[in-house]
Image (cartoon, rainbow, N blue to C red):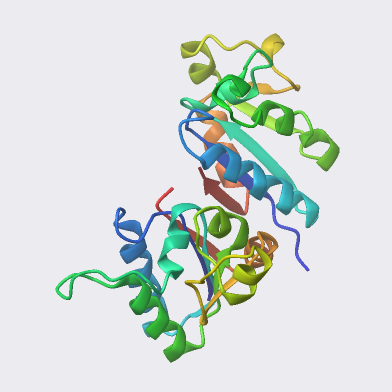
């Protein structure tokens, strides 16, 4: 069976709706199927990875702790759109796992280089 | 070409459910095949047999059901997304000790693995309503 590369693009803030959680569920399942998964966080999504988040205060499951388990599923290609990070004042040392900043040109290349692109 | 379709939008609050239906209908009429239609997020409400829109409005549940029967489509509803939104078939209702159920064939509750498999098998996976 041909191996397809999957790119998940998240653009929403983590707790305003169910998209971030449902995107992570797709990422983990696809990885369990042996598919190479990349994650790109744009717009309001970079705060998903902040280690300082305290969603328990609004009785929500901490999505950052799910994210910190991603490398165990061989999901290590985690990208953040630099402009979005800058807007939200998110820096790489504040995150629960290693990620890489990319610019708009990188994003275009990334979309071309993946077989399946899913937006959340 | 072999297509799969992934829908996020709710049946009656998002145009994406109907756009996805029209896309599927046209894909089939153009001679292509659809490997699977996967309902995720709020689109799982499409599987509820209790949906009863006014007669002069579209019945998305019924449209997909008829298309599925006509073309033997595989309509898969994400089970985790469905259960938490109160969409379940008879077997799940029993398992969760619920008094009733609201989903049945051709809609089938299954896991996200079916989405990964569809992504692997299909030439194109097209999403609606992200």
Residue drawn 53% across and 27% down? A45
- Determine whether, in the image, residue B48 is placed left or right of residue A75: left
Is residue A102 something that shows in the picture? no
Outermost residue toward the right in this view: A72
Q: Nearer the viewer, residue B72 or B122?
A: B72
Q: Please tell me whether residue A15 is drawn above or below residue B1 in the rendered image.
A: above
Q: Quadrant of residue A93?
A: top right
Is residue B128 something that shows in the picture? yes
Outermost residue toward the bottom in this view: B70
Q: Nearer the viewer, residue A27 or B110?
A: B110
Q: Nearer the viewer, residue B2 or A8?
A: A8
Residue B34, given in percent of the width and then of the height, sits at: 51, 77
Residue B80, given in percent of the width and then of the height, sits at: 62, 56
| Number of numbered discs visible in the structure rendering | 0
Residue drawn 56% across and 49% down? A117
Residue B116, given in percent of the width and then of the height, sits at: 67, 60
Q: Nearer the viewer, residue A8 or B94?
A: B94
Residue B51, given in percent of the width and then of the height, sits at: 34, 69
Q: Quadrant of residue B53?
A: bottom left
- Determine whether, in the image, residue B55 is placed left or right of residue B27: left
Residue drawn 59% across and 44% down? A23
Residue drawn 61% across and 62% down? B79
Q: Please tell me whether residue B35 is drawn above or below residue A43 in the rendered image.
A: below
Q: Please tell me whether residue A47 is drawn above or below residue A11 in the rendered image.
A: above
Q: Please tell me whether residue A106 is drawn above or below residue B48 in the rendered image.
A: above
């Amino acid at each position: 069976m041909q191996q397809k590369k999957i790119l998940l693009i998240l653009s929403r803030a983590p707790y305003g709706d169910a998209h971030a959680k449902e995107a992570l569920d797709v990422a983990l399942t696809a990885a369990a199927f042996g598919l190479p998964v990349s994650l790109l966080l744009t717009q309001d999504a970079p705060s998903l990875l902040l280690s300082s988040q305290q969603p328990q205060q609004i009785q929500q499951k901490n999505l950052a702790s799910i994210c910190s388990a991603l490398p165990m599923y061989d999901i290590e290609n985690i990208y953040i759109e630099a402009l979005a990070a800058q807007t939200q004042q998110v820096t790489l040392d504040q995150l629960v796992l290693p990620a890489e900043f990319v610019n708009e040109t990188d994003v275009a290349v990334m979309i071309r280089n993946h077989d399946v692109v899913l937006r959340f | 070409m072999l297509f799969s379709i992934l829908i996020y939008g709710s049946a009656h609050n998002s145009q994406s459910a109907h756009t996805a239906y029209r896309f599927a209908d046209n894909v089939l009429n153009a001679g292509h095949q659809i490997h699977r239609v996967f309902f995720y997020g709020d689109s799982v409400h499409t599987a509820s047999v209790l949906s009863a829109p006014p007669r002069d409005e579209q019945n998305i549940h019924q449209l997909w059901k008829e298309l599925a029967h006509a073309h033997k489509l595989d309509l898969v509803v994400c089970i985790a997304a469905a259960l938490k939104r109160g969409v379940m078939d008879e077997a799940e209702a029993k398992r969760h000790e619920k008094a009733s159920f609201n989903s049945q064939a051709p809609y089938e509750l299954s896991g996200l693995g079916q989405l990964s498999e569809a992504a692997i098998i299909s030439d194109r996976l097209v999403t609606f309503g992200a």
